[in-house]
């Protein structure tokens, strides 16, 4: 079976410093990966590379057979991504949901329903600018959009970092209730929270994958 994501000997430097130092990783259908490693290991750089944010200095990445830089639109259409830091979106919540509906075909009502399940009432914030939401509220809305898209592949970069304990519970419950086959990469510093949701652990250090092993439920 062909891989969803194929990462071959990927190298990326910032200034002269190697941040990704020869990463090879294959993500196959059904893989649900916890990606771990110390601050600065290169986790965010790797997931951003999967989403086509960077030109690589070496190696290649294919997502569903596509080049994430040259075929960015197609790649972004097939992956639900939650960035580590929410983007500074000036649109109001209402406008953002309209934009999501137009660009990805996900009805605003479906996002609002997911948001409700994350305990975020979008109705009462509809005219507020996205960037004026609290950190946790932004995170909840990004989660709601990602889940409403029903993508085959989720790439979540520390999705629970700004969530309160109750919201964390809700998020993990929603994931466990998804009723279709999906694959996922969760960047996290808390493996124990992902118990039952992941089946593979990848540990990065200094721009390299130093551990890659299956996890049993
Ligand atoms: N746009 C950039 N320009 C210059 N250096 C960068 C850039 N993005 C990341 N880096 C550097 O690359 C290294 C890896 O950063 P990255 O964000 O990938 O780490 P991380 O593993 O996600 O860490 P954390 O757990 O803190 O989120 C760091 O030294 C960082 O300063
Ligand atoms: Mg990071």
Image (cartoon, grey):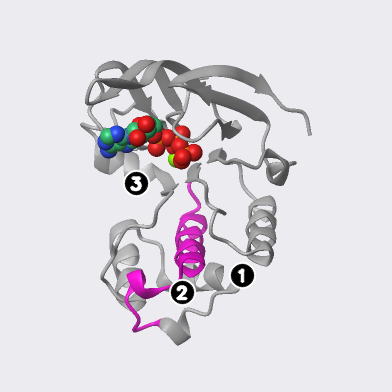
In the picture as drawn, the residue positioned furthest to the bottom comes out as 124
Neighbor class of circle 2 (other Cα within 10 Å; few <14, some 14-19, many 20+) is few
Residue behind mark 1: 117
Q: CA distance from mark 3 to mark 2?
A: 19 Å
Where are the magenta residues, as a range? 126-151
Q: Could you tell me how far apart the alpha carbons at marks 2 and 1 are, in whole angstroms?
A: 12 Å
Residue to which mark 2 is pinned: 109
Of the pair 6 and 106, the residue shown nearer to us: 6
Residue 144 visible in the picture: yes
Q: Is residue 129 magenta?
A: yes
Q: Label 3, on which residue?
A: 77
- Location of ligand 1 given as a quarter of the image: top left
For marks 3 and 1 on the same chain, the one whose residue lies earlier in the sequence: 3
Residue 112 position in % (x across, y down): 49, 73
Gap between marks 3 and 1 measured at Cα: 24 Å
Tag 3 secondary structure = helix
The answer to which quarter of the image holds residue 71 is top left
């Amino acid at each position: 079976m062909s891989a969803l994501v194929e990462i071959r000997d990927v190298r990326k430097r910032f200034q002269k410093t190697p941040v990704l130092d020869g990463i090879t990783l294959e993500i196959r259908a059904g893989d649900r990966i916890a990606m771990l490693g110390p601050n600065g290991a290169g986790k965010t750089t790797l997931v951003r590379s999967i989403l086509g944010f960077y030109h690589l200095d070496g190696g290649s990445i294919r997502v569903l057979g596509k080049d994430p830089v040259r075929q960015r639109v197609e790649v972004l259409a097939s992956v639900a991504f939650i960035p580590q830091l929410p983007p500074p979106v000036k649109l109001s919540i209402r406008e953002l949901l309209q934009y999501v509906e137009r660009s990805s075909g996900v009805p605003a009502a479906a996002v609002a329903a997911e948001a409700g399940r994350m305990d975020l009432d979008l109705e009462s914030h509809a005219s507020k600018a996205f960037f004026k939401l609290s950190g946790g509220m932004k995170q909840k809305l990004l989660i709601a959009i990602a889940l409403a898209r029903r993508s085959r592949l989720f790439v979540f970069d520390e999705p629970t970092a700004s969530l309160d304990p109750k919201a964390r519970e809700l998020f993990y419950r929603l994931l466990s209730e998804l009723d279709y086959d999906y694959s996922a990469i969760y960047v996290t510093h808390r493996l124990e929270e992902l118990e039952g949701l992941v089946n593979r652990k990848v540990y990065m250090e200094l721009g390299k994958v130093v551990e890659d092993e299956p996890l049993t439920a």
